[in-house]
Image (spheres, coloured by chain):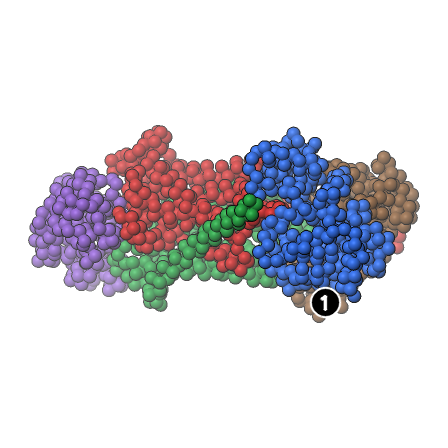
Chain colours: A blue, B brown, C red, D green, E purple
Amino acid sequence: MTDKLASQDPGDVLSAGADKFTVDGLDFFYGAFNALSGIDVRIKEHAVTAFIGPSGCGKSTFLRCLNRMNDLIPGTRCEGKVRLDGHDVYGPGVDPADLRRRVGMIFQQPNPFPMTIYDNVAYGPRLHGMRKRADLDAVVEESLKRANVWKEVKDILGRGGLTLSGGQQQRLCIARVLAVEPEVLLMDEPCSAIDPTSVQKVEDLMAELKDRITIVIVTHNMQQAARVSDYTAFFLQELAGEAAHLIEFDRTATLFTTPRDRRTEDYITGRFG
Amino acid sequence: MTDKLASQDPGDVLSAGADKFTVDGLDFFYGAFNALSGIDVRIKEHAVTAFIGPSGCGKSTFLRCLNRMNDLIPGTRCEGKVRLDGHDVYGPGVDPADLRRRVGMIFQQPNPFPMTIYDNVAYGPRLHGMRKRADLDAVVEESLKRANVWKEVKDILGRGGLTLSGGQQQRLCIARVLAVEPEVLLMDEPCSAIDPTSVQKVEDLMAELKDRITIVIVTHNMQQAARVSDYTAFFLQELAGEAAHLIEFDRTATLFTTPRDRRTEDYITGRFG
Amino acid sequence: MSAGSPREGQAQAPAPQDRGPAGNGGLSRISRATHLKEALLRNAFLVCACVAVAGVTLIFVFVGYQGWPIFAKLGIGEFLGGRVWYPTKGLFGILTLVVNSLLAMAGGLVLGAPLAVGTAVFLSEVASPRVREVTRPAVELLAGIPSVVYGFFGLVLLRPIIARVFGGLGFGLFTVWVILGVMIVPTIATLTEDALRSVPEGIREASYAMGATKWQTIWRVLLPAARIGIIDAVILGMGRAIGETMAVVMIAGNAPVIPDSIFKPFLTLTTVIVMDMPYASGDHRTALFGVAIVLFVISMIFVASIRVISRSRGEGD
Amino acid sequence: MRSLERVDKRLTNGLALGVIWLAAITTVAALGAILLYVVVNGIGSLTPAFIFTWPHGVNMEGGIWPTIQSTVYVTALAMLITTPVAVLAAVYLAEYAVQGRLVRTIRFAADSLASVPSIVMGLFGLAAFVEGAGLKFSVLAAALALSFLLLPIVMRTTEEAIRSVPRYARWGSYGLGATKWQTVSRIVLPSATPRITTGVILAAGRAAGETAVVIYTMGTMINAPLFPSDGGRTMPVHLMLLAQDGINLHAAYGTALVLVLMVLAFNIVARWVSRRNRSMQG
Amino acid sequence: GGPAQQKLTVTGSTTILPIAEASADMYQAAHPGTRILVAGVGSSQGIESVSQGTSDIGTSSRELAPEEKKLGLVDTKIALDAIAVIVNPSNPVRALTMQQAAAIFERRITNWSQVGGHDMPIGLVNRDEASGTRDAFSKIVLKGRDFDRTAAVLPGTGQVRAVVTESPGAVGFISLGFVDRGVKAVAIDRIRPTEATVADGTYPISRVLHFFTKGQPKGLAKAYIDFVLSTPVQDAVVRDAGFLPIDKALK
Ligand SMILES: Nc1ncnc2c1ncn2[C@@H]1O[C@H](COP(=O)(O)OP(=O)(O)OP(=O)(O)O)[C@@H](O)[C@H]1O
Ligand SMILES: Nc1ncnc2c1ncn2[C@@H]1O[C@H](COP(=O)(O)OP(=O)(O)OP(=O)(O)O)[C@@H](O)[C@H]1O
Ligand SMILES: [Mg+2]
Ligand SMILES: [Mg+2]
C-alpha cells in the first residue's frame, strides 16, 4: 500500500518543475538489515525538499544514497535506480568522487578540517586542481560571502576553523561546499547542533541558494521543514528491525495541512516520535 | 526577571503537598563554566516532577545536584542550598553514599552491571550489609516484581544482566534501585533508549511507584512529560556559553495549557529546540 | 508529614551497617570507619602510583652514583666530546659512540617510519575489516618478538645476504638500519593508527563528500590532522631505536670508530656496554655507567619533547 | 581538461594506495620471514630431549631445560611483583587522582620509565639490586629490575582498561549508595579484569623475551633456580651467548624457536582472553 | 679414604673456563658429594687468588711474570692453544710471514694483492677485548702493538669462523681446534699449523694453558687435575673447547 502511494504521488507533484534526482524502487541494506525499501521519489530542481520522520527511519541513509556516501560503509548495498539529471548514479564507471563534488553535503555536526579558515574553503578547489593563489583568494571570498559568514571571518582567515563558534563553523562548512560549485546540496540536520541565531542565518541562506542549487534537507524540526521547504517527504519505519518506507511525498503546504495518510497526520501532530 | 518568576512560583504551587526537596538559589559550575544559575524549586513528595528544556540546558546537571552525583566530576562546584526533608544535602559531614541510597537514580543508557540478573538486584542490599540468602532472595523477587520485570526474568535470574533487551535492562536497573528502598527516584531520560512497549511499562511503573516514592524525571519528550508528571519545570539556556535558568515551574496541566512565559510557550509549541 | 513518610520506607530497607547518628530521617554522616578506610586505601594507591616516580629517581641515583665519577674525572666536555674510545689506553671519549648511535637511529627511522606510517594508514583507512583482522595481529606480533631474536635473525640470515650482495663482511650501518627499521614499525604503527582513528569521522566524511579521493583525504586531511600523534609516535620510535641493544650488538661489528661506509663495522652507546661489561673494571666500568647516564638522559629528552609537543597542541588549535 | 585531471587524480590515488598496500605487505612479510626462518631452522631441534634435558659440554650441546625454568621463574616472579603495584597505581590514576602537579609528575615518570633503554635498566639492576642490595646474581634481582621495566606497561594498559569501563556502570553503583572503594572493587575492577589480564600477559611476554636486563641481574650461570636467591640463565641470554659464540648454531636455532613459540603463546592467549571478553559483552 | 676436602675452588683465566667447567661437571657427576666451584676472573686474578689461598687452583693462559715466580706456585700444563690465521678458501694466499700477519692486523697492508693475492680489500675480523685468544694473538703476533680499530669486533670464535667462511676478503684468527673446511688456515713463516707443528713448537702462534697450585697438588685438587689430564677429558673436553691436548706436546 505504501508503495502504491509513493508511486502515485510523483505524477501529481512532478508537473511543477524539472527533476534533479529521480529515485525508483530503491532498497538499501546495511549487511543483512534492510533499512529502506521501495523508495520512489523525484527531487525538484531549484527547490528545497525536506525529509522528515522519526529517529531511525532512514532519512540520513537515504540522503547518503544520493551522493553514494554509503559506499564508504563496508557491507552496505543499494538496489534500485538513482538518477541525477537522468544519468544513473550507480552506473558502471561513474566516479563517486566526481559525483560527490556535484552533490555536496552538510552534516549535523559542523566538521571543519583542523586547518585555517582559508584552507578549509580552499580545500575543495585545490582538490580539483586549482593552484593559483589569486584564483583561490577569489573563490574563498566568494564562497564565504555566499555562506553568509564573510563578515565574521574576513579578518581572521588564518585562524583555525575549529576556533569558530558552532554556528560559524556550520556556515564555514557550507562555504567549503559552495566553493566547489555543487549542483545539489544535501543537508543532514544542519541546524540541530547550532545556536538559534545561526539557525536563522542558515535558513535565510537556503532561501537565497535555491535559485541556483537544489537543496535537500533532513530535519527533525517540523516547524523548520514548514518554513524552509517546498516539498516534504515523510519516512516511517513501522516496526523496529523492519525496513522503512516513504509514506507520503507532496508539496510542503499540502502535506502539512491536508496529509493524505493517517500516519503522516499522527506524526506531524506529535502523536508519536 | 527569570529569578523573580522562579521565586514567585513556589508560593502558588507549593500549597498542594509536602516538599521533598527544597532548592534555593542554586548555582552550578563545571570548572569556570557556570552551567546553572539561581535555581529555586520545590519538589513535591509523592508526585512526579518533570524537567524539560532544550538539549544542554542543564536538566541532567540539576538532577545530579540532588543526589550529589556531580561530586564525582572533578572540578565541579555547587552553590546555594539543596534540602532533603529540610536537611542540607551539602551540609558538612553528610555521607553522599547514604544520600544516594535514599535518592536513587536511573540513567538514559540502561546500565546493568556485568553480572547476573540476581546479583544486579542484590548488589545494593549487599553493599548495605545484607548477607542472608533468604533475605536477598526476598528482596530480589520483590524488587523485580515492583519493577514490572519479574515475569520476564524469573526463570533466568542466573543469566548475565547484559543479555536482556534494552527495555528489560532498564527495568532491571529500576529494580536494582528499588531494592535499596529509595525515597526519591531521579530518572534522566529513562525512556529515550528503549523500545515503545518498554516505555509503556516504565510509564505505568511510575504511576504505581509514586504512592510511595517521589519521582523526578528528565525528558525530551513533551508528550511523555504531559502524560506522567504532576509538576513540570522548564529550563532554558538562552545564550550558548551562559548559565541556564529555571524559566517556569508549575503544575503540568497549567504549564502545558497556559504557560505564563512566552519562551515556555515557544518551546512547548516546538518553535525552537 | 503524611502517612507514607520516608521513615516508613526506611523501616523496610535493609539496615545499612554504619548508619551515622542522624539516621533518623535526617541525613547520615559519613562514619569514621568508612572515612578512615577510604582515606587509607586512597593513600595506599597513591604510594603505588609513586613507585614509578621512585623508579626513575632510583635509576638516576644508582646509575648516576656509579657513573658520575667519570664525568668528574674527565670533565663533561672531554667525556662527551672526546673522539677516542680506547679503554685499554685509558681513553674514554664517547663522541664516536654518540655519533654512531645517532647514525643508526636516523637510518632506522628513515626506513622504518614510512613503513610504519604506511602500515598504520593501511590499517586505519585502507584495509577491509577482514584484511585488518590479519594485519593488525601481525604488527602486534612483530612487537612481541624479543630483540635478541631480531639480532639472531640479522646475524645468521640478513648479514650474510648483505655481505654477498654488497661485499665486505656484512656488519655495519646498513644491516642495522634494516633490522631497526623493522623493529620500530610496531611502535610507530600502533600509535599512528591510534592517532588516525581519533580523527573525528565527520572530517573524513566531509572530505569524501567534497569529491576527494581516498588518497587526497589521507594526504591532505588525515595525516595533517593526526600529525601531532604521528610525531609523538616517531619520537617514541627514535627512543626505541637508540636504546636497542641486543639486536644491534650482533650485527654492528662493534669497531669503535665512525665508519667511512655504511657497510663497515661500528660501535654504539648501547653495544659498548654489552661488549665491554664482562671484563671492564675501574675507570672503564665507571665510563660504561657514564654511557648509561647519557642513554638515560637521551631517553628523558625524547619523553620530555613529546610532552612539549603534545602540550603545544593543547594551546594551538 | 577536467577529465584529464580526473584521470590524473585517479592515477595518483591508485599509485598511493598501492604504496600503502606495499608498506603493509612489507611489514607482514618481515614478520613472516622471521617466523619462517626460525621455524624452518629450529624445528629439527625441537625434540623432547632438547626441551627437557640439561645443556652440557663446552659448546652447550644437549637441551635447554634449565633456561626454560629460569625464564618461567623470573617472568612469573616479575609479574607477581609488578601486577599488584601497577594495577593499584592505575586505579589511583584512573579513579582517584585529580589533575594536578602530582599526577603530571607520576605520568611523566611512568612515561620516562617506559622509555628507559633496557640496557640501562640492566646496569641499574646491577648497581641497585645485585650490588647495592646485596642480592647477588639472582632471580629476585632480575625480577625486581624487570618489574621497573614492566610497571609502566601494565600501568598503562590497566588504566586504559579501567577508563573503558562505561561511566554509566560506575554511576549505577554510586547511585545505589556505594562508596568509592566499593564501586572500584566490585564493579570497575571486575569489569576491567579481562583487559587487564590481556595487558599482563603481553607484559609477561615482554619479560620472557628480555635479555639486557636479565644478563646483568641474573647472570649467565646454567642453573635451575629453586629459590629467588638463586641465579640462572634465561632463554634469551642463552640464545645470545650461543649466537655470539657461533659454534653450536643448532642449539641456537632451537632456543630461538622455543623462545618465539613462548612469546607467540603469550600473544595468542592474550588475544583469546580479550576476544572471549568481547563476545561475552556483545 | 677419599680426598681430604670435598670442596674445590678453581679461579682464573676465562680462556680456560670452558675446560675447567666442563671437566668439573663431569668430575662431580662421577664423584657425588664433591663440589667444584669454577669462576672466570682473568689469569692475573687467578694467580693472585691461588697464591693468597683464596682458591685451590689458579688457571692462567700466560706464563708467570718474573715477580710471580717467587710465589712458590707449581705449574701443571693442561692444554695447548694454537691460534690459526684463517682466510676464505677461495683466497689464493696460502702463507704469510709473521711481519705480514702483523701488518695486516695493524692495517698497514690493506689489500690482498700486497701479499700475493687478488686485488681485493682485506676485511679484518678481530675478537673482543675479553677474549684470551685476542690477548695471546696480540702478544705473540703484534708484540703488544695495537690492532686496527676499524676491524669488526666479534664476541665469539664461531662468529669469526662464519664470517670468514662467507666473505672472500676476510681474515681472522681462531683457535686451531675450531678450524674446519669452511676456512683455510694459512702458514706462518712457512709453517702450517697442525697438531704436529704445534706439538713440536715450530708453529709460532701458540701458548700453553696452565693450572697453578700452591705447592704440589694434593687431595681433591690432585684428583681433579689428574682427571683433566686423563685421555677422555683431553680428547673430548679440551678439543671441544678448541684447544689441543697437552699429551701430544709433552709425552
Ligand atoms: N552504519 C550502520 N550500520 C548498520 N545499521 C545502521 C548504520 N547506520 C544506520 N543504521 C540503521 O539504519 C536505520 C536508519 O538509520 P538512519 O541514521 O538513516 O536514520 P535517521 O532517520 O537519519 O535517524 P536520525 O533522525 O536519528 O538521524 C536505523 O535503524 C539505524 O540503526
Ligand atoms: N562534565 C562536564 N564538564 C563540563 N561541562 C559540562 C559537563 N557536563 C555537561 N556540561 C555542560 O553543561 C551544560 C548542561 O549540560 P546537561 O548535560 O546538564 O544538559 P541537559 O539539559 O541534560 O542536556 P541533554 O538534554 O542533551 O541531556 C551543557 O552546556 C554541557 O555542555
Ligand atoms: Mg540521521
Ligand atoms: Mg541530559
Q: Residue at x 20, y 63 (%)?
A: E1
User: Mark 1, residues whose alpha carbon is within 10 Å: few (<14), some, or many (≥20)?
Assistant: some
* Residue to which mark 1 is pinned: B153
Q: Where residue B144 sits: x, y (%)?
A: 75, 63
- In this view, the residue in front, A42 or C19, is A42
Is residue B220 found left or right of D129 in the rendered image? right
Q: Is residue A87 visible?
A: yes
Q: Is B89 placed above or below A58 here? A: above
- Which residue lies at the image location 71% right of the left edge and 51% below the top edge? A20
Residue A94, percent from left and from top: 59, 54
- Which chain letter goes with mark 1? B
Q: Secondary structure at mark 1?
A: helix
Which amino acid, by three-letter code, is at mark 1?
Answer: Val
What residue lies at 35% left-to-right and 33% top-to-bottom? C80
Quadrant of image for the C terminus of chain D = bottom right
Tell me if residue D7 comes above or below residue B245 in the rendering: below
| Number of residue marks | 1
Confirm whether residue C280 shows in the render.
Answer: no
Tell me the quarter of the picture where residue D235 sits: bottom left
x 42%, y 38%: residue: C298
Residue C188, placed above or below residue D208: above
